[in-house]
Image: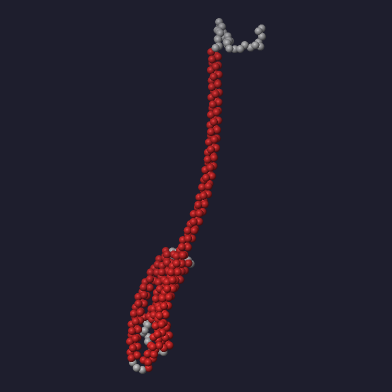
Amino acid sequence: MDRVVEEVEKVKKDFEETYSQTIKHVNSIQEYGKNTRITEASEIEEEEKKDSLPRLNGLAQDGLNMLQSLQFKLDLLAPQLPSVDYVEKAQDLAQSWKNLIQSLRVGLRNANLQAKANMKKAAQKERELLLGGGEESTIRRRNLQTKAGMTSAAENITESLRRTRQLMVQEVERSASTLMTFEESTGVLRKAESEYKGHRSLLMRTRDLLSTMQRQDVLDRLIIIVGFLLFSLAVLYVVSKRIGLLKLQSKIMASVKAGMAGQEGIVPIAGRDGIRVAPIHDNVVPRMDIPFE
């Protein structure tokens, strides 16, 4: 089970227990002053120590403060639940708790009014008994004189303890709120750390890609330069070959033109009978090795 869900269940259990105890205190306040009986001084002191009205009011107020603290804690935990259904149920429960606390406050106020009415009736009955004669009125006068100072001291101590308890409850609420804030901050920091790690790996991959692109750029430049040089050499070779062929062609043309000019200098001799005689060239060098004979 999720940790937040467990915490919510614990808050629900604490609320139910505190609510039942607070209801008992409110009912005790409402019934306060109804049961009156003649007792010894020690029995009256013990009864006032256990069930005095300020003490019951203090316990009821502490219960209401604890219920309000639990309702506030549930409001903080509700948005952190894992699903939307849990969140909606927790919010509805917190609203119902708020209504219960409000009704408890109204009930406590009505219970105090009822307790005051009961005490007024009891005081009137006590007055009637004190004004009467007999052993019963004597016992009551002695008990009232004995417990008067102790009751005021007990009420003062109870009130101071109640204020101390209320301050402690407020400090506990503040500590719980601070702890929840720290947990939320821790979660945000962990999320930021994971995102930073992801961005860091992405940056490293980007850096590797940039290095690879730079190396590829240098390699492409070298290939382009080498290709350009090879192309230039090929062009020079083709041009040189072309120039050589042109020179050869010009020489051939010149020799052809010279041959044509030599043919124009031949003197044709024809015989009488139309018999062609071998032509005689003027620019032919005679062979020196032929004998004159």
Q: Quarter-wise, where is residue 113 in the image?
A: bottom left
Question: x and y percent of residue 161 in the render?
Answer: 42, 78
Question: x and y percent of residue 14 in the render?
Answer: 44, 73
Quarter of the figure with the C terminus: top right
Asked whether 201 or 54 is in front, the reply is: 54
Residue shown at 35% from the left, 81% from the top: 115
| Direction from residue 258 to residue 78 in the image, left or right | left
Residue 15 visible in the shown view: no
Q: Give the colouring mode of the picture.
A: secondary structure
| Direction from residue 261 to residue 150 in the image, left or right | left
Relative vertical location of residue 182 with respect to residue 106 in this rendering, above or below:
above
Q: Quarter-wise, where is residue 251 in the image?
A: top right
Question: x and y percent of residue 13 in the render?
Answer: 44, 73
Question: x and y percent of residue 50 in the render?
Answer: 42, 83
Residue shown at 53% from the left, 47% from the top: 211
Residue 277 visible in the shown view: yes
Outermost residue toward the top in this view: 272
Outermost residue toward the bottom in this view: 134
Q: How many marks?
A: 0
Relative vertical location of residue 133 with respect to residue 63 in this rendering, above or below:
below
Residue shown at 41% from the left, 89% from the top: 40
Asked whether 171 or 67 is in front, the reply is: 171
Residue shown at 55% from the left, 37% from the top: 226
Q: Quarter-wise, where is residue 65 in the image?
A: bottom left
Relative vertical location of residue 207 with respect to residue 144 in this rendering, above or below:
above
